[in-house]
Image (cartoon, grey):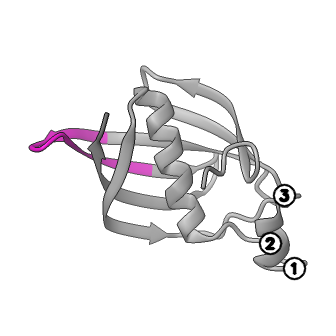
Amino acid sequence: MELKNSLYKIIGINRDSQIAQIELLRECAIYKAHFPEQPITPGVCIIQIATELLKEILDLPLSLKELVNAKFLSVINPVNTISCSCQFQKLTELPEDRIKVSAIFSDESTVYAKLSLIYAKYE
């Protein structure tokens, strides 16, 4: 299930620096359920957002194969955090058409999540 334009929208992408700026859509049904009156972005949604943004930046069809590491350092609350960025680093080509990458979700003052992910390219 794609979350773009329901949970978040892209407000800017820099393919050269591999950074995407997103705005969280706090009226999304996910926030109403997780949790009422105290919405937070679920970790699984953060991983899905990273996947969607990497596909957009690389303009490649990708499938998440492995979550190597996930550190959720601060809660992403769409009321307090209206926008944040996702920066991709350490993009490494692996055998069998796989890509390993690190993704960092942050804003000017807070790092929210650090992910290490492996994707497979597919046609």
Q: Are marks 1 and 2 in contact (CB under 8 Å)?
A: yes
> Local crowd at mark 2 within 10 Å, few (<14), some, or many (≥20)?
many
Residue 77 lies in what quarter of the image? bottom right
Q: Which mark is residue 26?
A: 3
Residue 9 horizontal side relative to residue 120, left or right: right
Q: Which residue is mark 2?
A: 39
Q: CA distance from mark 1 to mark 2?
A: 6 Å
The residue shown at (85%, 72%) is: 32
Q: How far separated are the C-alphas under marks 3 and 2? A: 8 Å
Q: Position of residue 16 (x, y in %)?
A: 42, 20
| 22 up-or-down from 119: above or below | above
- Local secondary structure at mark 1: loop
Circle nearer the N terminus (3, 2): 3
**In the drawing, does residue 1 fall left or right of residue 65?**
right
Please name the amino acid that badge 2 sits on. Answer: Pro
Magenta residue span = 90-103
What count of labels does the image hold? Answer: 3
Q: Residue at x 46, y 51 (%)?
A: 104
Classed neighbour count for the residue bearing mark 3: other residues with Cα under 10 Å, few (<14), some (14–19), many (≥20):
many
| Mark 3 secondary-structure assignment | loop
Could you say which is closer to the camera, residue 10 or residue 86? 10
Point out residue 116 in the picture as x, y percentages from the top left corner.
Answer: 33, 58
Residue under label 1: 36
Q: Amino acid at mark 3?
A: Arg
Quadrant where the C terminus sits is top left
Q: Is residue 33 left or right of residue 106?
A: right
The kind of residue tagged 1 is Pro
Question: Residue 100, relative to residue 65: is it above or below?
Answer: above
